[in-house]
Image (cartoon, grey):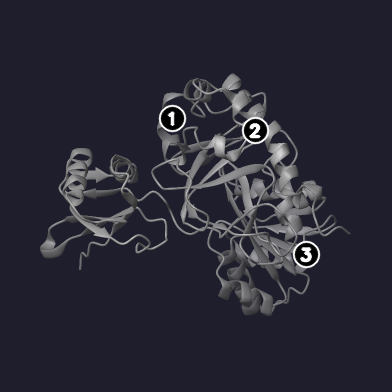
Amino acid sequence: MSKYFDALETRSPDERKSALATRLPQQIAHAKTNTAYFAETLKGFDAATITSVAALAALPVVRKSDLIELQKQHRPFGGLSAGGWGRLGRVFSSPGPIYEPEGRSADYWRTARALYAAGFRSGDLVHNSFSYHMTPGAWILEAGAQALGCTVFPAGVGQTEQQVAAMADLQPNGYVGTPSFLRILLEKADELGIKLPSLTKALVSGEAFLPPVRDALLARGIAGYQAYATAELGVIAYETEARQGLVVDEGVIVEIVRPGTGDPVAEGEVGEVVVTTFNSDYPLIRFGTGDLSAFLPGVSPCGRTNMRIKGWMGRADQTTKIKGMFVHPEQVAAVVKRHPEIAKARLVVTNPDSTDLMTLNCEVAAPGGELGKAIAESVRDITKLRAEVALVAVGSLANDGKVISDDRKYD
């Protein structure tokens, strides 16, 4: 049996670049022609010229945080969907509310590849403990499992004793769900004196999969792997047996950009995950997830040749309220753009003596002259708030993707 899901996973860089040069302009043209949102936001761009990731970076970012308002203005999907109800198979609701469409194609969310890398194969019975109620999580995993030829037990959430009883009776090979709920099920099985020897594999998502949890599963004979997915995009990246970051799925393009901008960061620098999908029903172009991650250098030892990310590293939306005014990462980015001397900046908010204080830390190569004063004036102009400015050496700010750090103490 093949180690890889298909030949796409081991393509050479030239093969992947050539395929992208054909596929990307077609998808952008499709989005412009068939969605109201991209018809407007991309009207000044020629799809035929967007043939690389570098060219893609010139396009605007649509962020997940914008979806609630967009969907109020243009129901139900903010003008981002390419089809009506007849074209779609299901519609889901996530907190917000944000509504997500599901098309009718097999493995719509592209989950089979991640499941295959985690060891799932045709003929397996999969215990699915994601929620089947309103949100798409369970359906995302079920679609991939069925595309592989697996049978799915739709367990959903809660009712731990009944779930353990079903696992004891049916003897599933694998589990999909959150790692924390798998731990709860295993501990309940221990409490009830029930053995689950058939369970040897798991694909987990929805929360951080920490090494201690992974190792605890391995001690029970369960090889757990993680997938990074969202309700809008499906699977973005997934873990392999190499356990060195997450390999980007073949059905998306991933960029890492400076939070609050659409500007790509240097390899290894933490930033916001921005994804372009080749989904024809919901053709998201440069969709800002609001999640933080970073690219890993080189190719995975598992042999898959696509780029890798470190995994989920927090949230990029660092908007905070200071003296009754909201300050956004986009405003910090606007200050940086006014002053090309700034290599990187971080706004730190403290409250000494119970009074809010903003300090903009700026990495600059030459800190002399009136630069600090000019930057402070820009901050006041853009945010309508006063700030201290600290000029620091290039490379001295932490590489954690933070643009605004709220360090106020309230105890």
Q: Residue 232's x, y, as percent? A: 56, 40
Q: Residue 70's mark?
A: 1
Question: Can residue 142 be seen in the rendering of this structure?
Answer: yes
Local packing at callout 2 (Cα closer than 10 Å; few below 14, some 14-19, many 20+) is many
First reached walking from the N terminus: tag 1 or tag 3? 1
Q: CA distance from mark 1 to mark 3?
A: 42 Å
| Identity, as a three-letter code, of the amino acid under mark 3 | Asn
Q: Residue 305's x, y, as percent? A: 71, 54
Residue at the spot 51% in from the left edge and 58% down from the top edge: 268
Residue at the spot 71% in from the left edge and 65% down from the top edge: 301
Q: Nearer the viewer, residue 361 or 169?
A: 361
Q: Give left or right: position of 274 versus 382.
A: right
| Identity, as a three-letter code, of the amino acid under mark 2 | Leu
Q: Secondary structure at mark 3?
A: loop
Q: Is there CB contact under 8 Å for labels 3 and 2?
A: no
Which residue is labeled 3 in the image? Answer: 173
Which residue is labeled 2 in the image? Answer: 24
Q: Residue 256's x, y, as percent? A: 51, 49
Residue at the spot 70% in from the left edge and 76% down from the top edge: 194
Q: Which quadrant holds the C terminus?
A: bottom left
Q: Nearer the viewer, residue 311 or 223?
A: 311
Q: Residue 287's x, y, as percent? A: 52, 39
Up-down: is 387 above or below 263? below
Q: Residue 38's mark?
A: none
Up-down: is 43 above or below 142? above
Residue at the spot 72% in from the left edge and 38% down from the top edge: 18
Q: Secondary structure at mark 1?
A: helix
Q: CA distance from mark 1 to mark 2?
A: 25 Å
Q: Give left or right: position of 119 versus 329.
A: right
